[in-house]
Image (cartoon, rainbow, N blue to C red):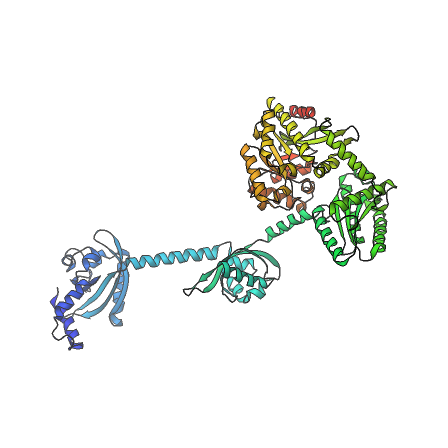
Amino acid sequence: MNQTLLSNGLHMVRKRRISPWSGIDSERVLQVLVNNLEGMVFRCAIDEHWTMHFVSDGCRELTGYSPGEMEFNRGASLEMITHPEDRARVRNTIAEAIPQGGRYRTQYRIRHKDGLEKWVLERGTIVHDESGEMVLEGFIEDVTEQVLSLRLLADAEMRYRSIFEDSVVGMFQTSIDGHYLAANQALATLYGYATPAELIAGLSDIAGRLYVDPQRRDEFKRQIREHRRVTDFESEVYRRDGSRIWISENAHAVIGRDGEPLYYEGTVEDITAQRNYQQQLEYQATHDPLTGLPNRNLLQDRLHQAMRLAQRQGTQGALAFVDLDNFKFINDSLGHGAGDRLLVEVARRLKACLRDSDTVARYGGDEFVLILGDHGGLSETLHILHRIQEIVASPINIDGHELRVNCSIGVSVFPDDADDLEALLRHADAAVHHAKGLGKGQFQFYTESLNIAARERLALDSALRKAVEEQELYVVYQPKVDARGRPCGFEALVRWQSAEFGAVSPVRFIPLAEENGLIGNLTRFVLREACMQAALWRAQGHTDLRMAVNISPTLFREKDLAGLIQSALDEAGLPAANLELEITESMLMGDVQQALAVLYELKAMGVSIAIDDFGTGYSSLAYLKRFPIDILKVDRSFVQECDGGNEAVAITRAIISLAHSLNLRVVAEGVETHSQMAVLNALGCEEYQGYLVAKPLPASDAAAFLAARRSL
């Protein structure tokens, strides 16, 4: 060890603190201290190679070289082991320190003897040695770990900031008391601000300035207090320009060491489009797409409200069944378009006749139902009915034709005649048939004497019970084709040729069968016949055809539906892959777990599951995602509107797009025109069914249809 350096060091120590060193071997203490520091103590010349006059034992671990190799550059020099890119910077730092008092501090890289690169921190002073020459005395320590940690931290912070600033999703930090601490550009843009700074300055009170309902902020905080986070927290908010949008927030509280929340942070997404689509579907589920009037679903709710009000007030109300006279003649003569415009105008006139508290709903076809409160007693009800007849009967100009239609009205009174919708409708229907029998354009109140329609209904019920046994029922098959017109399959539909009533429309006997419990027998009959026919066509070479059979709600709820299906397949010798079961949305809305169990059992057999008439019920595609469904049939009401322009096609496009996102095959039913098919094809619909393709066909005609298209 350089004894001069030690002596100088001890001399300085003695000069400052003489008394405490008395009796201590200070030279030994200093030597132990220097050689046990984690780093290298050194003295070197200020020359080209930083020639070392002295280095401590710490140089071995720091550089890989022994003190003997480093001193006087016998084996290596400090200049040599300094990274070439750092040498000039280190030398400049030291040079700049000379006129500033001699102290310096610099960080740079060195190359260890084994080739490893290290980061070191050098702190030193420029002094004069015993001969008056300027030298460097200092200490070099390994700071590789600290440098790398800082770099990792900086990288992590840069990545976080990049995610925060460049994310397409709005991100924020807000104080507990309700102002923004930080926001990214996506959030600023979402809320209509040019920059995050403008957003932070403009929304100093989140509860009062952002949320349309100020209580949402309190609910936000309550949920975080209870659950430490909010998930899919949906709210309506104001943008900077005053417009409103719907957002979904996902956020959590950042907790301090004392367990108390420091601030909230999270993300915001614009869900306005989803909300609008959901509202559209809900509207479609409760309103008639043609007239915009409430449909049967909403009618039930409105009647319950009216009946509860009448019960509380001890009054009565009326349910009026309105049936347009001669509508079918106009519809057949001028076409469905003219018929639809006529219905829209009649709906408008009916609404204009009623009070705000009354309801008009489209029941189906040319039938409307009115719910009239008893605000003015019987005389007020009679006045409304007379006004309806007068206004509906006034001329309507459609496509240059002056049309006149009358309406027959049947009225039942609640709670006197009945206290539920079905019974009231039956009574009103009996009354309207009686009114038509009197010469149309009349209105009649239901009384016990009006049993003509009821007796006919009973007779129809009795005949339907015998129809299966007497082989009056038969099955027709409506083709489904792809965009090139190639047959994909058929839908099996039941028909009834009654010895007593002649050809009975399914519109009449299917609802009757559902009401009297015969629908299960009808479905079994159709299932068996359809499987037999499909097996026959398969044997003739049509191996890929799928036969679709509608499953009634009653049959769907039976315990051994899968057994019934399997029995029909086995009896016919038809593979399960050739059978498609159509169910309606309403079947899935009750006992969800039971519905799931039934569907998974059917899927395990290998049959396909289709949702029929999608858009007419309360469900959504997100809801249907829970069920093992293969096919979605777009309701004919959407199909008929799809070629009406951008607004008309929007819902159909959304349904098809979202169905594809759930890997569902899309079938359009009720396709009647080439323009509808072209639009549906452009939207990605896979299969088409409707009168444009073919009407429901007897088995022999369906076979001819297959033969004619075999070459496609």
Q: Nearer the viewer, residue 217 or 169?
A: 217
**Quarter-wise, where is residue 457 in the image?**
top right
| Residue 183 horizontal side relative to residue 447, left or right | left
Q: Position of residue 640 (x, y in %)?
A: 70, 40
Nearest the camera: 657 or 188?
657
Any part of residue 417 in sight: yes
Residue drawn 65% across and 38% down? Answer: 554
Quadrant of the rendered image containing residue 501: top right
Residue sitting at x 58%, y 66%: 208
| Residue that sits furthest to the right in the current view | 439
Towards the viewer: 198 or 420 = 420
Q: Is residue 693 visible?
A: no
Residues 126 and 210: in front is 210
Residue 51 lies, in percent from the top left, at 17, 61
Please indicate whether residue 415 sits to the left or right of residue 185 in the image. Answer: right
In the picture, which quadrant includes the N terminus? Answer: bottom left
Q: Residue furthest bottom?
A: 19
- In the picture shown, does residue 588 fall above or below 261? above
Report the number of numbered marks. Answer: 0
Quarter of the C terminus within the rendering: top right
Measured along the vertical axis of the image, is residue 353 above or below residue 539? below
Q: Is residue 192 toward the left or the right of residue 636 in the image?
A: left
Residue 81 on image: x %, y %: 22, 56
Q: Position of residue 604 (x, y in %)?
A: 53, 34
Q: Is residue 352 above or below residue 140?
A: above
